[in-house]
Amino acid sequence: MDYFEESLKFIESEEMRECFRNTLLVESARLKYDPMLNCGEFIVGSRSSITEKLAALRKLPQHKEILDLIKAAEFALAERESVKDNVFLVTTHYPYRDDGKCDTWDERTPYLSYESVMDWINKHTDKECEMYSETLEQCMNRVWYEVEKFVPDENNELNLKITWTLNAKGEIMFFEIDDNFKEKYKVYEHNDDNDDWIAWHYWEGSHHWTAPPIPFDFGDIITIDMRPFYEYFRGVIIRIEDNKDCCAIACIYCDEDGYLDNQTLKHNMRGILTKVSPLYRAELFKGELPENESVLRNISEAIKKVPSTEQVDVDNGIVYRKHELADQFDDFLAFGSYKKKDGYFGCSWDEFRENFGM
């Protein structure tokens, strides 16, 4: 299918791309769902510009869901046009930290046109590249922008209408319509089984739909790449369940303080709903782990010593793998009562090792 190959171009990981090429159409037929949603998400949830995404969506079979995604994107692009009394504000963002915050630099000067905002962004990106001796591509892994558009109401009060997320080139990647306008602009009801299909919701980032098959096994150490929204790090696969659940795949990782935690790979690594899913950029890590992540090798080796088993969900006809030790690690980190001294959840390596006799 040409459209399927078109959507795979938006998967940055060669390993994930090849896995989807070999398994996704078979899996979707077995689980009786339309792979068109996966194709749409591969495109919409990528780091590519909205214009590239829109061009690719138009090449897909024009199912209602795809038409809705196109309609929402066209709305977001049209909103760049300025009308009287519109105000635009821009914020520069840097990668998130484990406390859920990220460094920002607000340009609170109100602009009366999107073009004026773009002039400022282009100049600011040039300064960032010069300051850190970076190429534009390197800067794109570290800097991103949010542009907000405010429109006046009948009381001449300004209300936020739409927020665009832009890369360091000034290209729109994602957008979000404010709650006050969502009811007016939402697109939904694509079939009788799902009456809350909302196209603009999927342009907010890759948090939704199912987690497709992966080419990794329990205990594999993989790269976790959510740049520019978070720094690059690594994790150990501890959960591989059925492909109907967006939380089916999970990893153990070391947070910035060296504590262990676990989160789902699809959309919640480090507990932050970043726009870009690390699932579609994951690759097997083969190098030397940095000192602050070295304990991941111990965890990986412990899991690899224990074979996984197959489980059958008779009701749904699903066969998936289970791993007893990895499940124990998962449960311990998910439901443990431990907290770091600053109040955030996390388990030290000594606590973890003592609990499992490692």
Image: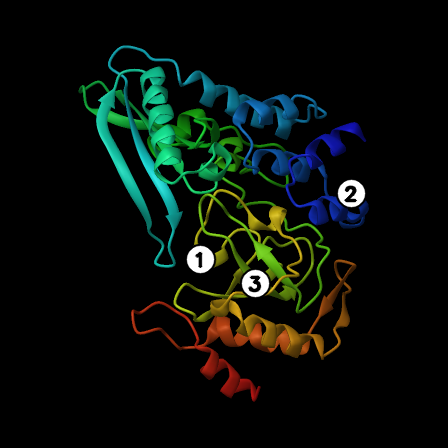
Provide residue 211's location: percent of width, then percent of height. Answer: 64, 51
Label 1 Cα neighbours within 10 Å, binned few <14 / some 14-19 / many ≥20: some
Q: Give the residue type that dot 1 points to.
A: Gly
- The percent position of residue 29, horizontal first and vertical second, equals 80, 45
Q: Which residue does the numbered mark 1 point to in the structure image? A: 271
User: Looking at numbered disc 2 in the image, what kind of residue is underneath it?
Assistant: Arg
Kindly identify which residue carries mark 3.
Answer: 235
Say whether disc 2 or disc 1 marks the residue closer to the N-terminus. 2
Q: Position of residue 205 (x, y in %)?
A: 50, 40
**Residue 5, horizontal then vertical, whole percent:** 75, 33
Report which quarter residue 180 is drawn in.
top left
Element type where label 1 sits in the image: helix
Q: CA distance from mark 2 to mark 3?
A: 24 Å
Q: Nearer the viewer, residue 34 or 232?
A: 232
Sequence-wise, the earlier of marks 2 and 3 is: 2
Query: For residue 21, which numbered disc appears in the image?
Result: 2
Pointer 2 local density, CA inside 10 Å: few below 14, some 14–19, many at least 20: some
